Amino acid sequence: MDVTINNDQQLPKLLIVDDNVEIRKLLWLTFSDGNYELFEAENGRDALKLIIKEKPDIILLDVMMPGDIDGLAVCDFIKSSTLKNCRIIMLTAKGQKEDYQKGLDAGADAYVTKPFSPMALMEIVENALKR
């Protein structure tokens, strides 16, 4: 799904980052309505490669992922780089108050806990892109 042109306007790029293949499938289906150019990664290292290459407009980012780079590190990297205008929505099972604060401290624009409502998440993404 690499078609990016719709009435001569480029679609917003949305990157899904989660190690759980079922969550990635659900998010892909949720946002595959033709309003976004979609990308996905299963860990922080692959996410950073895609972020540098594709420069997404918005990222749905899990916190806990395998490997040496978690979602908080990815978020912190983005917000301290030239890509700092990219919107980041943390989408995670970590729902404690201190987890939420860590996400905001890393620069997340929103923090959503799993399980989540796909329709509510779509609204959060749309609102984040309007900012």
Image (spheres, rainbow, N blue to C red):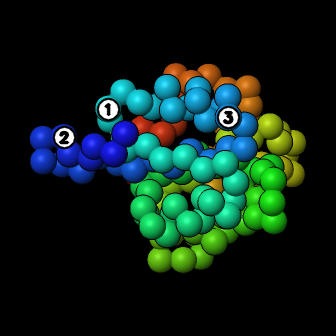
Residue designated by label 2: 6
Q: Which mark is residue 76?
A: none
Q: Residue at x 50, y 55 (%)?
A: 87
Residue 19 left/right relative to 5: right
Q: Amino acid at mark 1?
A: Gly
Q: Amino acid at mark 2?
A: Asn
| Quarter holding residue 71 | bottom right
Which residue occupies 86% across, 51% down? 98
Q: Quadrant of residue 26?
A: top right
Residue 71 appears in view: yes
Of badges 2 and 3, nearer the viewer stands 3
Do the residues bearing badges 2 and 3 touch, measured as CB atoms within 8 Å? Answer: no
Left or right position of 117 against 114: left
Residue occupying the far left of the picture: 7
| Residue at which label 3 appears | 21
- Please name the residue shown 76% across and 64% down the image: 69
Q: How far across and how far down the image is residue 3, in percent?
A: 28, 43
Q: Which residue bears the numbered disc 1? A: 34
Q: Nearer the viewer, mark 1 or mark 3?
A: 3
Reading the chain from its start, which is encountered first: label 2 or label 1?
A: 2
Vertical relation: 106 (above or below) 95: below
Mark 2 in CB contact with mark 1 (< 8 angstroms): yes
- State the image coordinates of residue 4 (x, y, percent, origin top left): 27, 46
Q: Position of residue 17 (x, y in %)?
A: 62, 48
Q: Amino acid at mark 3?
A: Val
Front-lying residue, 98 or 117: 117
Q: Is residue 109 visible?
A: no
What secondary structure is found at the residue carrying circle 2? strand
